[in-house]
């Protein structure tokens, strides 16, 4: 049981807490609380010891790299983006993304853009995911972990995005990262088009002077 007095957490009051489970990847705690309506209750939370990362890796032909693997909790096969965990205090999210892309697919990327973060299930866990866009890819041999049996394929980015929006790709980081990447790439293309139009207008004005 953890020492200390009551602690306000928004409209909740934590009276006392205890760790109920711990392994190298997660820590589970249960707190005795007063709920927002003042009645007593419990609240269980899961702390993940790795920060999640996902990579939208797009090659020169506009194809995104997907990784297939069987996920133990669902006993089902999933196609998803290259993903992994960033050890607390061990790597930055970007360093972890670089490593995971190389380990799972063999690809290295010369160009990286950060697509932001998200909370993965904020009612019961503090797990955070960081999303990246990787381009200018160079292939190489993959080196997956011993608990991974992976397949790798490429798919046109627009088709992968369509599948995510249609519910054909369902893994949460994959759906979120593809949506963020589509927004980022659309804005990038729009800015490039606007810059080109401004340059052309300036050249026309100069020629007419």
Image: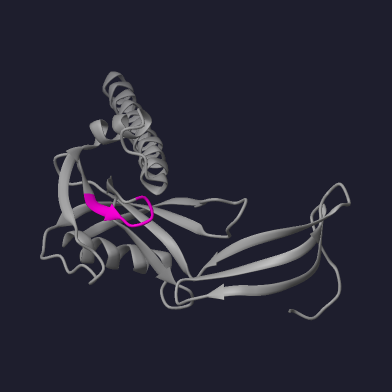
Up-down relation of residue 68 to residue 188 (above or below): below
Up-down relation of residue 135 to residue 108 (above or below): above
- Which quarter of the figure is the C terminus placed in? top left
Protein image colouring: one colour
**Residue 128 is one of the magenta-drawn residues:** no
Q: Quadrant of residue 166?
A: top left
- Which quarter of the figure is the N terminus placed in? bottom right
Q: Residue 187's spot in the image, x, y percent?
A: 39, 35
Q: Residue 167's spot in the image, x, y percent?
A: 36, 31
Numbered marks: total: 0
Up-down relation of residue 195 to residue 78 (above or below): above
Frontmost residue, 122 versus 30: 30
Outermost residue, top direction?
208
Frontmost residue, 155 versus 200: 155
Outermost residue, right direction?
38
Q: Main secondary structure of the magenta part?
A: strand
Give left or right: position of 40 versus 205: right
Magenta range: 67-74
Q: Quadrant of residue 6?
A: bottom right
Q: Residue 202's spot in the image, x, y percent?
A: 33, 27
Up-down relation of residue 56 to residue 86 (above or below): above
Residue occupying image coordinates x 45% and y 72%: 25
Q: Residue 47's spot in the image, x, y percent?
A: 56, 66
Q: Quadrant of residue 90?
A: bottom left
Residue occupying image coordinates x 26% and y 53%: 70
Residue occupying image coordinates x 16% and y 44%: 154
Frontmost residue, 106 versus 33: 33
């Amino acid at each position: 049981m953890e020492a200390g007095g009551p602690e306000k957490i928004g409209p909740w009051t934590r009276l006392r807490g205890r760790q109920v489970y711990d392994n190298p990847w997660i820590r589970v705690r249960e707190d005795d609380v007063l709920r927002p309506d003042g009645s007593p209750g419990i609240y269980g939370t899961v702390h993940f010891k790795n920060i999640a990362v996902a990579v939208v890796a797009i090659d020169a032909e506009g194809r995104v790299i997907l990784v297939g693997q069987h996920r133990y909790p669902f006993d089902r096969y999933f196609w998803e983006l290259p993903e992994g965990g960033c050890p607390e205090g061990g790597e930055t999210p970007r360093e972890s993304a670089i490593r995971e892309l190389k380990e799972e697919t063999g690809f290295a990327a010369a160009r990286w853009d950060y697509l932001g973060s998200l909370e993965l299930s904020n009612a019961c866990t503090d797990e955070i995911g960081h999303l990246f866009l990787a381009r200018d890819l160079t292939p190489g041999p993959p080196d997956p972990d011993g608990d991974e049996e992976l397949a790798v394929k490429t798919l046109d980015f627009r088709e992968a995005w369509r599948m995510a929006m249609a519910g054909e790709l369902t893994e949460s980081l994959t759906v979120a990262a593809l949506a963020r990447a589509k927004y980022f790439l659309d804005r990038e293309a729009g800015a490039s088009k606007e810059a080109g139009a401004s340059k052309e207008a300036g050249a026309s004005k100069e020629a007419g002077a």
